[in-house]
Image (cartoon, helix red, strand yellow):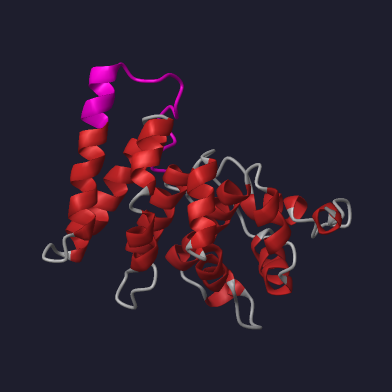
């Protein structure tokens, strides 16, 4: 299952941009943000603007991520749309991952938006295994696992909250057994370990 990583060939925040370049970057984020909010545009164009913001936030440093974080409510709202395609859903998950990557304030915004509740909904499965899921549907779940791992980065309150979800535990057990070919890590397995769902990694956060 190919990850199709949007950012895999990009370097996240290796160095801050020069002031002029940073101003241009922020200007691009603001323009993309206007397109995201512009309901007169087609959904495809708004999703493309969301994709642009994700790349800019991921590569542009903490200031860029801060500006991009202002549009997280609009991005989260996309995930509630019944007409959102699977491909568009993946794009939004990628964008939220880029915005939240090692950025505590944006992680907190995600918590305030109850984003994890939406993500758990994407992961939740019926009693039947994932055998009937399409490749794109499974890819949504893989990206959801990745975003959850980003939101848990150095974030004990989020880890503690997720570690109490038995449905998440069951869903991750299913997903960690899937083939994570072309992904840098099996993020379902990482979450199983991080959240204390593995016997070798006890749920220490419940004691904190």
For residue 144, side relative to residue 4 (left or right): right
Q: Disc count in the image? A: 0
Q: Position of residue 138 (x, y in %)?
A: 51, 64
Relative to 185, residue 131 above or below: below
Q: Position of residue 82 (x, y in %)?
A: 34, 78
Residue 9 can be seen, yes or no: no
Residue 186 can be seen, yes or no: yes
Relative to 14, residue 151 above or below: below
Magenta run includes residue 6 = yes
Q: Residue furthest top?
A: 18
User: Residue at point 67% right, 68% down?
Assistant: 168
Q: Residue furthest left?
A: 40
Relative to 11, residue 200 above or below: below
For residue 150, side relative to residue 86 (left or right): right
For residue 27, side relative to residue 135 (left or right): left
Q: Position of residue 135 (x, y in %)?
A: 46, 64
- The segment highlighted magenta reads 5-25
Relative to 157, residue 8 above or below: above
> Along the line of sight, which residue is nearer the eye, 74 or 45?
74
User: Residue at point 74% right, 62% down?
Assistant: 163
Residue 36 occupies which quadrant of the picture?
A: bottom left
User: Residue at point 65% right, 47% down?
Assistant: 155
Q: Main secondary structure of the magenta part?
A: loop
For residue 7, side relative to residue 88 (left or right): right
Residue 202 occupies which quadrant of the picture?
A: bottom right
Q: Position of residue 170 (x, y in %)?
A: 72, 71
User: Residue at point 37% right, 60% down?
Assistant: 73
> Along the line of sight, which residue is nearer the eye, 50 or 205?
205
Residue 42 occupies which quadrant of the picture?
A: bottom left
> Along the line of sight, which residue is nearer the eye, 63 or 179?
63
């Amino acid at each position: 299952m190919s990850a199709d990583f949007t950012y895999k060939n990009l370097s996240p925040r290796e160095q801050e941009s020069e002031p002029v370049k940073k101003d241009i970057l922020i200007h691009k984020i603001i323009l993309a943000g206007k397109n995201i909010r512009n309901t007169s545009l087609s959904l495809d164009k708004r999703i493309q603007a969301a994709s642009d913001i994700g790349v800019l936030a991921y590569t542009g440093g903490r200031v860029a991520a801060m500006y991009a974080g202002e549009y997280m409510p609009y991005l989260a709202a996309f995930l509630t749309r019944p007409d959102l395609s699977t491909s568009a859903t993946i794009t939004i998950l990628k964008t939220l991952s880029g915005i939240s990557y090692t950025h505590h304030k944006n992680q907190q915004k995600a918590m305030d938006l109850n984003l994890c509740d939406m993500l758990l909904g994407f992961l939740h499965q019926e009693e039947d295994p994932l055998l009937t899921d399409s490749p794109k549907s499974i890819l949504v779940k893989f990206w959801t696992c990745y975003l959850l791992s980003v939101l848990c980065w150095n974030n004990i309150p989020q880890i503690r909250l997720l570690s109490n979800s038995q449905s998440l535990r069951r869903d991750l057990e299913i997903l960690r057994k899937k083939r994570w070919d072309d992904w840098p890590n099996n993020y379902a397995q990482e979450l199983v370990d991080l959240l204390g769902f593995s016997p070798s990694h006890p749920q220490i956060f419940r004691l904190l």
